[in-house]
């Protein structure tokens, strides 16, 4: 049983133990052969140890310099690699293949420096060009370049590739704090907070004082706490408090779009319940700009437009939501309400025509009609007789509906009186100039009007 527990340790240390035993051999040719075998197996640390030992035994071993330069270049230890290449060329000047390798090394070194410069300037696409096309071609094991690439991908919001790239790094070094941080942030921006949290926690166990890991961990914790508070307050009908919580959560990280879309939706729903239609429209529009297929945001924006009496906008949003979610009865009911309100908005407002409120008494209605009938009687408006006739017809139609209790109740309920043939300025209404089946009104005022129109209220 004990040997099973010891096996992983033996496998881990075997290259080092092998390297140590080989170093004790003191035969440069054998050591060089072992170093070459290790390089072919990509055991670069072991190979580097052997090559160091060879050069201690034989400072003029040209091939050891070349091999060590190759290992150092692979790890982007460019200055050290350059020194070894130059040492080789001192021993064997004019070797074209090594001169080419040295030129590639210098190209990789310059490209890495340029990549850092572009990163500082926020030109992350150019960072990827330098790293992918030059640095990692000539220095494929360059950890600095791999981390720089992952940072650029994160800045470009290519989160899946960040996870992929950092995965390769962590496979070689599972305790790499920078890779844990970058991978955690990628999961965070994909709104996979549990996985993000595990990466942050692992990093903090390795280095409890790592400032960026602490910032990421506690920032996420604070965001989730504020979100929970907003949802709980909304559930308890503490809508004003919930609104402030949602706004505070949204302000924490405006770039966290995949998560913020749900915060915008929660805020919109809460604002609708508070009757704050204009604000609700704005935040639902924000949600839809992130996810245009979010049906609930579309329906809630339709509800908000009902609050602002944007009937056409409400119908448009709710119709689209109903098409995307045909089984949702709540959306269908809201759409029917919006369509009815739109239809009502296009009919004539008899209260407005008479200049009275919807709570006006029968006496108020009669007084308003009497005053306006006198004002707009065609015989008193000779110069604008056509306009006066039109206005008088409107006034008479308004009075016909609002003075009849049954018609008024039906009108207030939103019923279409014209379709029902109950008057109101359409085919079933009356013409005060004698054109139809209306009532005859006689109005005595100072001997009547010259044109013979007489109106009797009562």
Image (cartoon, helix red, strand yellow):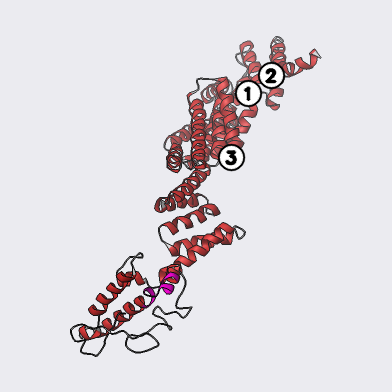
Is residue 279 visible to us here?
yes
Give the crowd class for mark 1: few <14, some 14-19, many >=20 residues within 10 Å.
many
236, 291: nearer the viewer? 236
Q: In this rendering, would 229 be left or right of 402?
A: right
Magenta stretch containing residue 401, yes or no?
A: yes
Q: Residue furthest front?
A: 458
Q: Mark 3 and mark 1 in contact? Answer it, CB < 8 Å.
A: no
Give the crowd class for mark 3: few <14, some 14-19, many >=20 residues within 10 Å.
some
Tell me what residue is drawn at x 56 percent, y 61 percent. 332
First along the sequence among labels 3 and 1: 1
Instruction: Name the quadrant of the C terminus.
Output: bottom left
| Residue under numbered circle 3 | 161
Tag nearer the camera, 3 or 2: 3
Q: Residue furthest right?
A: 1
Q: In this rendering, would 404 be left or right of 336?
A: left
Which stretch did the figure color magenta?
400-409
Tag 2 secondary structure: helix
First along the sequence among labels 2 and 1: 2
| Residue under numbered circle 2 | 32
Tag 1 secondary structure: helix
């Amino acid at each position: 049983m004990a040997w099973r527990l010891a096996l992983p340790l033996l496998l881990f240390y075997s290259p080092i133990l092998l390297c140590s035993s080989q170093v004790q051999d003191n035969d440069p040719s054998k050591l060089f052969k072992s170093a070459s075998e290790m390089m072919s197996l990509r055991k670069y640390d072991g190979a580097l140890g052997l090559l160091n030992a060879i050069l201690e035994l034989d400072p003029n071993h040209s091939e050891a310099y070349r091999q060590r330069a190759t290992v150092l270049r692979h790890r982007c230890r460019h200055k050290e690699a350059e020194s070894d290449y130059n040492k080789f060329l001192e021993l064997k000047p004019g070797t074209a293949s090594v001169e080419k390798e040295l030129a590639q090394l210098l190209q990789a070194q310059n490209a890495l420096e340029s990549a850092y410069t572009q990163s500082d300037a926020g030109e992350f696409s150019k960072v990827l060009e330098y790293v992918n096309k030059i640095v990692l071609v000539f220095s494929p094991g360059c950890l600095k370049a791999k981390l720089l690439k992952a940072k650029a991908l994160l800045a470009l919001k290519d989160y899946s590739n960040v996870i992929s790239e950092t995965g390769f790094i962590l496979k070689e070094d599972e305790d790499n704090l920078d890779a844990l941080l970058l991978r955690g942030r990628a999961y965070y921006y994909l709104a996979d907070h549990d996985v993000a949290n595990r990466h942050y926690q692992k990093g903090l166990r390795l280095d409890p004082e790592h400032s960026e890991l602490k910032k990421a961990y506690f920032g996420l914790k604070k965001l989730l706490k504020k979100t929970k508070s907003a949802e709980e307050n909304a559930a308890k009908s503490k809508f004003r408090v919930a609104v402030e919580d949602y706004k505070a959560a949204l302000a924490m990280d405006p770039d966290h779009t995949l998560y913020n879309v749900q915060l915008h939706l929660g805020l919109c729903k809460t604002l609708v319940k508070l009757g704050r239609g204009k604000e609700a429209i704005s935040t639902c529009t924000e949600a839809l700009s992130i996810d245009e297929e979010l049906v609930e945001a579309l329906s809630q924006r339709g509800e908000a437009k009902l609050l602002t009496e944007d009937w056409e906008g409400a119908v448009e949003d709710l119709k689209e939501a109903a098409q995307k979610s045909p089984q949702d009865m709540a959306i269908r009911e809201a759409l029917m309400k919006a369509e009815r309100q739109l239809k009502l908005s296009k009919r004539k407002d008899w209260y407005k025509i008479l200049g009275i409120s919807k709570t006006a008494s029968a006496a108020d209605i009669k007084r308003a009609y009497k005053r306006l009938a006198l004002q707009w009687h065609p015989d008193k408006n000779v110069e604008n007789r056509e306009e006066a006739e039109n206005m008088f017809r409107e006034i008479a139609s308004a009075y016909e509906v609002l003075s009849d209790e049954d018609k008024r109740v039906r009108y207030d309920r939103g019923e279409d009186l014209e379709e029902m043939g109950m008057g109101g300025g359409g085919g079933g209404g009356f013409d005060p100039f004698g054109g139809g089946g209306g009532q005859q009104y006689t109005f005595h005022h100072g001997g009547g009007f010259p044109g013979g129109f007489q109106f009797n209220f009562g």
